[in-house]
Amino acid sequence: MEPVSMVFGAIIALSGVLVGRTMTKRQQTQSQHAAQQAVTAGNRNPQPICGCGHHLVFHDQESKRCQAQVVIPGRWTGQHSSTYRTCMCQGYRGPMPVDEYYAPDLLNGDS
């Protein structure tokens, strides 16, 4: 074999090893980032979201109808610009948030 072809083969093998190591490190950092996002998402309080995707605060207390605006893209209606209309949700049917109450401490010895 010629020495030039052996050097060329060694360069190909070395580049394969380097690419494999960088891809593994990239996958590890992506998995660590995904795990960190899952932990931060788990620490947040659950939000009352309706079936229409809007929060409970957008729904009227008496009629339970959604008051949020929905964007209709122009390509669906054949117009050049987008239009807005009221959400057609009939009412919030999701879980009601638990009220927060103050409970006095029992360990201060006053009881």
Image (cartoon, helix red, strand yellow):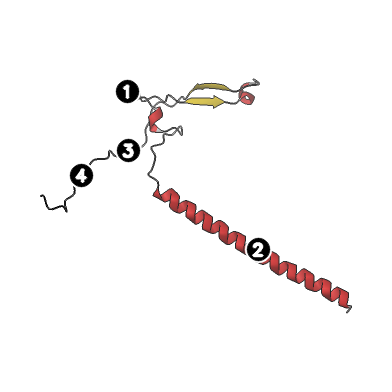
Mark 1 vs 2: CB contact within 8 A: no
Please name the residue shown 81% across and 72% down the image: 9
Distance between the alpha carbons at the discs numbered 1 and 2: 58 Å
> Amino acid type of disc 1?
Glu
Label 4: which secondary element: loop
Q: Residue 68, how many percent across, how many down? A: 45, 26
Tag 3 residue: 97
Q: How many marks?
A: 4
Mark 2 residue crowding within 10 angstroms, few (<14) / some (14–19) / many (20+): few
Residue at image coords 42%, 24%:
67
Mark 1 or mark 2: name the one nearer the start of the chain: 2
**In this rendering, the label closer to the viewer, 3 or 2:** 2
Tag 4 or tag 3, which sits nearer the N-term? 3
Between 15 and 67, the residue placed more toward the observer is 15
- Which residue lies at the image location 78% right of the left edge and 69% below the top edge? 12
Q: Which residue is mark 1?
A: 62
Amino acid under disc 4: Ala
Q: Which residue is mark 2?
A: 22
In the rendered image, residue 102, in percent from the top left (x then y), is placed at 22, 42
Label 1 sits on a secondary structure element that is loop
Decide: marks 3, 2 in contact (CB < 8 A)?
A: no
Residue 29 x, y percent position in the rendering: 57, 59
Q: Is residue 33 left or right of residue 66?
A: right
